[in-house]
Image: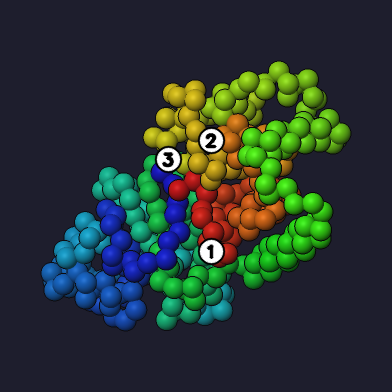
Amino acid sequence: MPLEIIRDDITKVKVDAIVNAANKSLLGGGGVDGAIHRSAGPGLLEECKTLGGCQVGQAKITKGYNLPAKYVIHTVGPVWHGGRHNEEKMLEDCYRNSLELAKEHELESIAFPLISSGAYGYPKDDALRVAMGVIEQFLLHNEMKVIIVVYDKTSFMMSKNLFESISQYIDDVYSEQRISNIRPDFEQVRYHSAMDMESKRVLEESTTRKGKRKLEDLVNHVDETFSQMLLRLIDEKGLSDSQTYKKANIDRKLFSKIRNDVNYKPSKGTAIAFSIALELNLDDTRELLLKAGFALSRSSKFDIIIEYFIDQGDYNIFTINEALFAFDQNLLGV
C-alpha cells in the first residue's frame, strides 16, 4: 500500500492507528499529544496510566476510544540538541518501532505526525527526511498504508536546496514557455491531432538521441495498450510485480486490475508513477503516457516537476512526492 502526505488534523484521520508524539510519562501534554488526549477522552489517560511510561525511541499501543482511529501508538521522540546526541537514530527508532508494533497487531493503515518537529525542536526538513527514509524501507517489505499528517504549511519543510532548485527550474521553463507563445497559437488544434503530433515527435527524437531505442523498435509496439506496454517494460527491466508497484507507490489491488485488464485506462498520475518506478527517460515516459491518452505539458507545474526529477535521474517516488506536496500538487501513486 502507498505512502501519502496530507494536510489535516491527525485526530480526525480514519485509519487503524494514529501515532502520538508523546512524552515519557504518556500522561498527555501539549501539541499533538494534548490534542489526541482531548479527542480520545478520559479512557485514554486511564489506560496510559497502566503502561508505566515509555522511553525515547520506543512505542506502546492503546485503544483509540473516542478517536476515529481504532488504536493510538504512543512513541517518544528525541529532543533536538544540535544533532550530536544520537537524535537521528532515536527518531528512526520512533518510526521503526511504531511500524513494527502496527504490523504485530496486523493493522492495515497508520498515520504519523512529524515526530519531534514541534516543541522538541528537531529541524523540520531533517525530521521529514528521517521519517520518509524509515517508512520507505518498511514499505519495500511490507503491505501497509502509511500517512504522514501535517497540520499546516509551516509544519512541513523539505530540503531548502532542493526546493530552490526546483523553483528555479520551474521559473526557467515558464520563461521558455512565454517565449514560445510568440509562435502561432496551437490551443485550438483538436486533441487527437495534438496527440498524433506528440507521438511523431517522440518517435523522431528517439531516432536521434544517443542510447535511445531505434524507430523500428517503437513501430513494432505501436498497437500496444498501456497495460501491454507496462508489463513488457517490467519484464525488460527485470523487475517483479511487487517491486514495481511498491516503487510506484501503487496499491497492489490497483496493479492487479491493470495486469488483468489489457484495456485498462489509468489516471495520469498512475501512468507517471509507473514511469518513475521503471526509471524511464523522458522519451519513454512520454510514450507510456500516450498509451494512456496523456502528454507532458510545459504549461503544467506538476508536469514540470516530474520532468525536473527525470532530468536529474532521481527516481525516488517518495522524494518526488515531497516536492509535489511542497508545491501544492497532487501526489503520485496514492
Residue 204 seen anywhere in this rendered image of the structure: yes
Please name whichever residue, 57 or 209, is drawn nearer the observer in this view of the structure: 209
Amino acid bearing label 2 = Thr
Q: How many numbered badges does the structure rendering display?
A: 3
**Which mark sits nearer the N-terminus, 2 or 3?**
2
Relative depth, front residue between 266 and 127:
266
Q: Percent position (x, y) of residue 238?
A: 61, 27
Q: Are marks 2 and 3 in contact (CB under 8 Å)?
A: no
Name the side, left or right, on which 33 lies relative to 136.
left
Of badges 1 and 3, nearer the viewer stands: 1
Other-residue count near label 3 (Cα within 10 Å), few / some / many at <14 / 14–19 / ≥20? some
> What amino acid is found at the position of numbered circle 3 in the picture?
Asp
Which of the labelled discs sits on residue 244, or is there none?
A: 2
The type of residue carrying mark 1 is Asp
Q: Which residue is mark 3?
A: 251
The quarter of the picture where the N terminus appears is top left
Kindly identify which numbered label has been placed on residue 328: 1
- Specify whether 35 is left or right of 79: left
Report helix, strand or loop for mark 1.
loop
The correct choice, above or below, for 250 with respect to 146 in the image is above
Residue at the image point whose x is 50% and y is 41% from the top: 267
Q: In the displayed structure, would residue 2 be above or below residue 152?
A: above
SS under mark 2:
helix
Distance between the Cα atoms at labels 2 and 3? 11 Å
Q: Is residue 205 above or below residue 128?
A: above
> Quick one: label 1 or label 3, which is nearer the N terminus?
3
Q: Viewed as shown, does residue 35 lie left or right of 235? A: left
Residue 154 spot, x, y in % from top left = 49, 76
User: Residue at left 19%, top 60%?
Assistant: 63
**What separation in Å lies between label 2 and label 1 (alpha carbons)?**
26 Å
Q: Do tag 1 and tag 3 residues touch (Cβ < 8 Å)?
A: no
